[in-house]
Amino acid sequence: MANFQPQWTNKAVVKPSSIVDSGAKFSFAKDAPGETFGKLEKPIPPSNPYTSLTDDEAEHFLVHGWLKVEGGFHQKYIDEWLPDFWIRTGYDEQDKTTWKEEYLHVAHHRQARNEEFCPKAWSKIVDLCGGEKRIHETRERWIGDNFIVNFGSEARSKEDPASHPPQDKSGFHSDNDWYRSFLDSSSTAMTIVHCFTDIPKNGGGTWLCEDSMKGVCEKLYAHPEGLDPVIDTPVLCKHAKDCHNFTAVEAKAGDTFILHGLLPHTNSFNYKHYARIITNPHVTLKEPYNLNRGRGDGDYSLLEQVILRALGRTSIPEYHPTRPRMFWYPRNSAFKLNKVDDELARLKADRASRGMPETTIDSVYLGGEEVMKDFIKRNGYDLPFNKDIGLELRQHVA
């Protein structure tokens, strides 16, 4: 199908991590300058005034690590993109017996520039990043229709949500399948949740674990050698089972949630047995965070301030990565890209059944060489393959 894919008929055996997670409190920063300690209770006023973000929103993001933007993206993308979703899956929207899986990821066919797709949310994203000049010009600057769908099930709808508290979920994570993580890594500066359907209470909205941010930042500080995806990063969020401040996403179609890239989250069960549909893109910055700008420096982005606040610091001059930064082909793309051929076949059959030409199918895979070249670069498919972690060939489960 696509010649940029590595040969992934064989899945690598992931080597064991050398990272020990004892669950004990970390002893760190003993040699740090005393004047660099102090908890940020309020956002530092920015050197350049926010263009969209309100003071209340800035404080909410600093304290909670996430922000909800009502009507964050245009309704037209819901209207234009969702009909093809049902065709691509082969599922019947009106017949739940055709919904074969409880949790489903699909491939990425369409794309729209962030500024066009979600101007309201994007303006706040820019403010949170400290200005558009800090955002990577290419990586994940386009939003796609690679939907994540939580259907629930008939059996799930008969369960009591109270019997499944978020602490029992084993899948808490911060998104990263393609780079070595350091405390100052900004390659997944934000995780974005665009809601293509309403998400009611107990309707499969993403769980956000607010009070686990501190532990994540402590572990990254304690490991300046960096943590590699899959091998080491699972230790980052193990402590979520002992946390207490959880928020489940509830939304109207068109709403956007902006999460700090280090905020642990996971899927929740859908007890309503309907198609909860989201996309989950990210924001990548050009450079690592600067966590040593000095007390009260207005050039600290809110993303940086969240990390400082979690560690009770005003700057972290002593932190320096001790291994090279590494970037790889995104591991989790494999199982989604493997669905492209089947999805295209269904789209072509649909158009033929309606007497429509294939040119009415909006897919990057039918766009020609230049379109594919851009698509490959935007998604990191030109990066080297990490043989130590292999590729994820299995559909994620609920």
Image: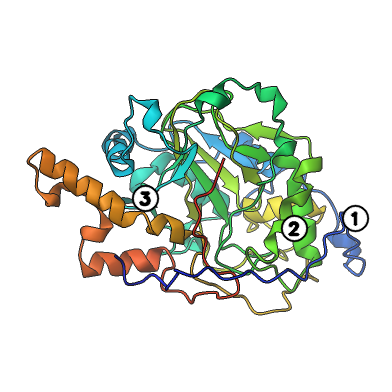
Q: Position of residue 123 (x, y in %)?
A: 46, 45
Which mark, residue 235? Answer: 2
Give me the C-alpha separation between circle 3 and circle 1: 41 Å
Q: Amino acid at mark 3?
A: Gly
Give me the C-alpha separation between circle 2 and circle 3: 30 Å
Q: Amino acid at mark 2?
A: Val
- In this view, the residue in front, 370 or 308, is 370
Label 1 belongs to which residue?
24
What's the residue at 65%, 66% (across, down)? 181
What's the residue at 82%, 65% (across, down)? 20
Q: Secondary structure at mark 3?
A: strand
Q: Are marks 2 and 3 in contact (CB under 8 Å)?
A: no
In which quadrant of the rendered view does residue 36 lie? bottom right
Looking at marks 3 and 1 on the same chain, the residue that comes earlier in the sequence is marked by 1
- In this view, the residue in front, 370 or 108, is 108
Give above or below for 144 relative to 133: above
Give above or below for 246 relative to 140: above
Q: Is residue 283 left or right of residue 212?
A: left
Image mark count: 3
What's the residue at 55%, 49% (across, down)? 191
Q: The N terminus appears in which quarter of the rendering?
A: bottom left
Tell me, yes or no, if residue 132 can be seen here.
yes
Q: The C terminus appears in which quarter of the rendering?
A: top right
Q: Amino acid at mark 1?
A: Ala
Looking at marks 1 and 2 on the same chain, the residue that comes earlier in the sequence is marked by 1
Q: Position of residue 64 (x, y in %)?
A: 69, 39
Q: Position of residue 351 (x, y in %)?
A: 14, 43
Which mark, residue 144? Answer: 3
Looking at marks 2 and 3 on the same chain, the residue that comes earlier in the sequence is marked by 3
